[in-house]
Image: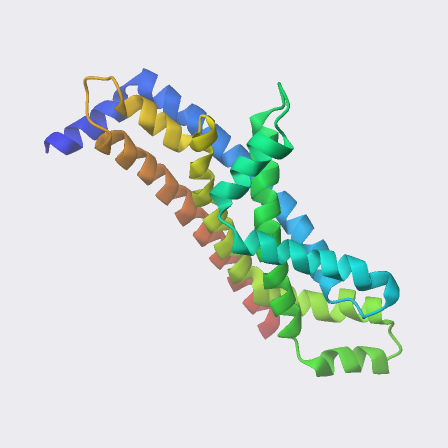
Amino acid sequence: MDFLSKIIELFSTEKYMDSIWEGLKLTLTISILAALLGLVLGVIVALVGMAKDSWAMKLPKLLCKIYITIIRGTPMALQLFIMAYVIFAIRGFPLVITATIAFGVNSGAYVAENIRAGILSVDIGQTEAGRALGLTGATTMAKIVIPQAIKNVIPAIGNELIALIKETSIVSMIGMYDLTMAAKIIGSGNNMASYIVPMAVVALFYLAIVYLLTFGIKLIEKRLRAGDKR
């Protein structure tokens, strides 16, 4: 009961809630912008990686392969540190942009692999049917293959987005004021509780975000399945 009363006290204290709302705003800002960047980057990398072999595409395909290998093979925290203290170590450069690029680039590698897997999951007969109807390779991909691939990759993309939101909690390591940093500050130097109470409250916010996102993804999947039945 004492633990519960401390949580209620935190929710009812304007100063503490203002700190949490400020952290939530930054967490959502980075998550949304990074997800959009990762989606765009992932689509481009996936399409380049699956393009036909030619001299013109040899270097772009190699670069995409190197990009995916490095990003997927190194820790997100290390990538964030490199972005913040090496690549964008410029006085006055906004940390929000640095974090958005870091998480967007990381997410893009995973999205690219998800999209590639989704395209490969579409039966080759679909492509052959499109070409038999006189459609070009690009048109067949855009109008036949990709729409089917999107249905296949939505769950994987949704999982990547959920992982991205949770991973943003490490931005506090470079001094950014997100949800996790808010919990740390509230938990230190106040007379209401140890770290466990603010951390538990912040965990509830993360759970709520993930639950809403999961619910939205399931609705999209349901609508797409309903379209297939028609």
Name the residue nearer the viewer: 93 or 22. Answer: 93
Does any portion of residue 62 appear in the rendered image? yes
Residue 142, position as x, y percentages in the image: 77, 64
Assign the N terminus to one quadrant of the image.
top left
User: Residue 180, located in which quarter of the rendered image?
Assistant: top left
Q: Position of residue 54 (x, y in %)?
A: 85, 68
Q: Residue at x 47, y 39 (%)?
A: 168
Q: Residue 159: percent from the left, percent from the top?
A: 48, 56
Residue 21 lies left or right of residue 127; in this view the side is: left
In this view, the residue in front, 230 or 125, is 125
Above or below, 97 relative to 123: above
At horizontal 48% and vertical 48% (from top left) the residue drawn is: 75
The one nearer the camera, 201 or 100, is 100
Q: Residue sitting at 43 percent across and 31 percent down? A: 172
Q: Quadrant of the C terminus?
A: bottom right
Q: Is residue 143 left or right of residue 117?
A: right
- Disc tally is 0
- Residue farthest to the front? 86
Compared to residue 133, the image places residue 45 above or below, namely: above
Q: Is residue 26 above or below residue 219?
A: above
Check the image and report above or below for 186 versus 3. above
Q: Residue at x 89, y 78 (%)?
A: 134
Q: Residue 177 appears in which quarter of the rendering?
A: top left
Q: Is residue 16 left or right of residue 176?
A: left
User: What x and y, as percent, mark residue 121?
Assistant: 62, 74
> Is residue 191 rendered to the left or right of residue 69?
left
